Image: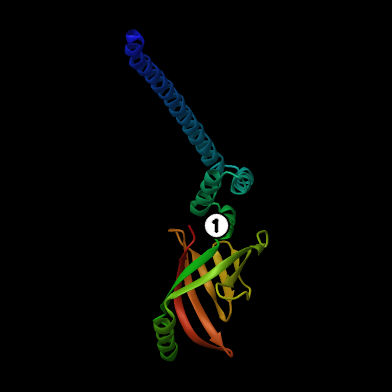
Amino acid sequence: MRFGKLLRPVLGLMAFSFVLGEESLAQQVDTAQLIEEARERARRIEEAKAVLNDPDPIVRLTSFDALATSGDDILRNVAIDAGLSGADAKMRERALIYALLQLTELRFTLVPDATAERTVLEASRERVSTRGSDLHVRVDRKSSNFEGGVVTIRPVDRNAPGQMTVSGTTLRFSLAGTSGVLELQDDDTISGVLRHTAQGRVTAQYKASATIR
């Protein structure tokens, strides 16, 4: 009986050590699997970058479309980032559209345009002081036309539709009395001049910019 009592702690310790050993082995297997998955992911990313820089423009563009519409978030972002920073004009245009359609909202920062007429500049400053310097718009992916380069946008507080029409790296903005031309910049922002009009005359004019990535 005494021997049984003495043996119980030893058996318990052995069982505990066995469980720890199994957990350690499982952790080693999990770590090895994670490392292998990471290597495979890195290999696929490098392959994607290589095909996006193929000397054949048809290969570049078809590969870009396949990656940008894939269900893999990482490869999709690799394609869009490569397209935005690349020298291929058509791929850059498509990357800009894809980047916009990935967003649910665009947040523009508005700065009164010092080159505007004095009365317009004063009105712009007054508008910013009372309403703030942000312009938020919703991106309506369902109503947008990718092949036509038309991205549908709406004010955040109502459903009136507007649009941004993409041509190359230029966007023509039109929404609720505000319109203008924006350009894609190297830092993945779009910027340009937006004007607010009422009854056919400009009532406010801003330097506007928004981050798209």
The residue type indicated by label 1 comes to Ala
Q: What residue is drawn where x is 54% and y is 51%? A: 80
Q: Is residue 67 above or below residue 198?
A: above
Q: Is residue 60 above or below residue 188?
A: above
Q: What residue is drawn where x is 34% and y is 13%? A: 5
Q: Pick the quarter of the image with the N terminus.
A: top left
Quarter location, residue 138:
bottom right
Residue 166 picture location, percent across and down = 59, 64
Farthest residue, direction front: 1
Q: Is residue 179 above or below residue 28?
A: below
Quarter location, residue 96:
bottom right
Q: Is residue 182 above or below residue 22?
A: below
Residue 167 picture location, percent across and down = 60, 64
Color encoding of the figure: rainbow
Q: What residue is drawn where x is 58% and y is 89%? A: 200
Residue 141 picture location, percent across and down = 63, 61
Element type where label 1 sits in the image: helix
Does residue 117 appear in this view?
A: no
Does residue 110 appear in this view?
A: yes
Badge 1, how many Cα within 10 Å: few under 14, some, many 20+?
Answer: many
Quarter location, residue 170:
bottom right
Residue 53 picture location, percent across and down = 53, 43
Q: Which residue is mark 1?
A: 99
